Image (spheres, rainbow, N blue to C red):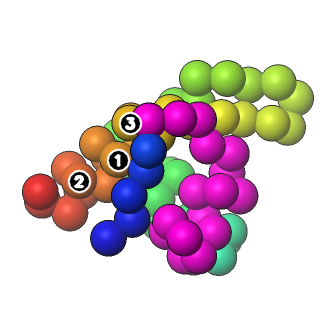
Amino acid sequence: MPMFESRSYLQKEIIDKDHLDMHLMTFYKYIKREKNFPKPFFVSGNRKKWDGTALQYFIDKKSGR
């Protein structure tokens, strides 16, 4: 089960092997398209950052914890 700390994460950090451990296309196809997936709190060009607490809440809710 991935654990996200209460800090900001870039997309490549979310899908790395220490957290979700999935390919980018799998992430877009099954997770990012969901309407409940948290919105990034910082957007600057191609760089987006997500809140770790919001990501952890989303994962916990999706898994039924």
Q: CA distance from mark 2 to mark 1?
A: 6 Å
Which residue is the extreme one toward the left? 65
Residue at image position (73%, 25%) is 43
Residue 58 image point, x, y percent = 32, 46
- Contact between marks 3 and 1 (CB within 8 A): the answer is yes
Left or right side of 55 for 22: right
- Contact between marks 2 and 1 (CB within 8 A): the answer is yes
Q: Which residues are magenta?
A: 6-22
Residue type marked 3: Thr
Total numbered badges shown on the rendered structure? 3
In this rendering, does residue 35 appear at all? no
User: What residue sits right under mark 2 in the picture?
Assistant: 60
Residue 31 image point, x, y percent = 46, 59
Name the foreground residue: 22 vs 1.
Answer: 1
User: What residue sits right under mark 3 in the picture?
Assistant: 53
Badge 3 local density, few (<14 within 10 Å), some, or many (20+)?
some
- Quadrant location of the N terminus? bottom left
User: What residue sits right under mark 1 in the picture?
Assistant: 56
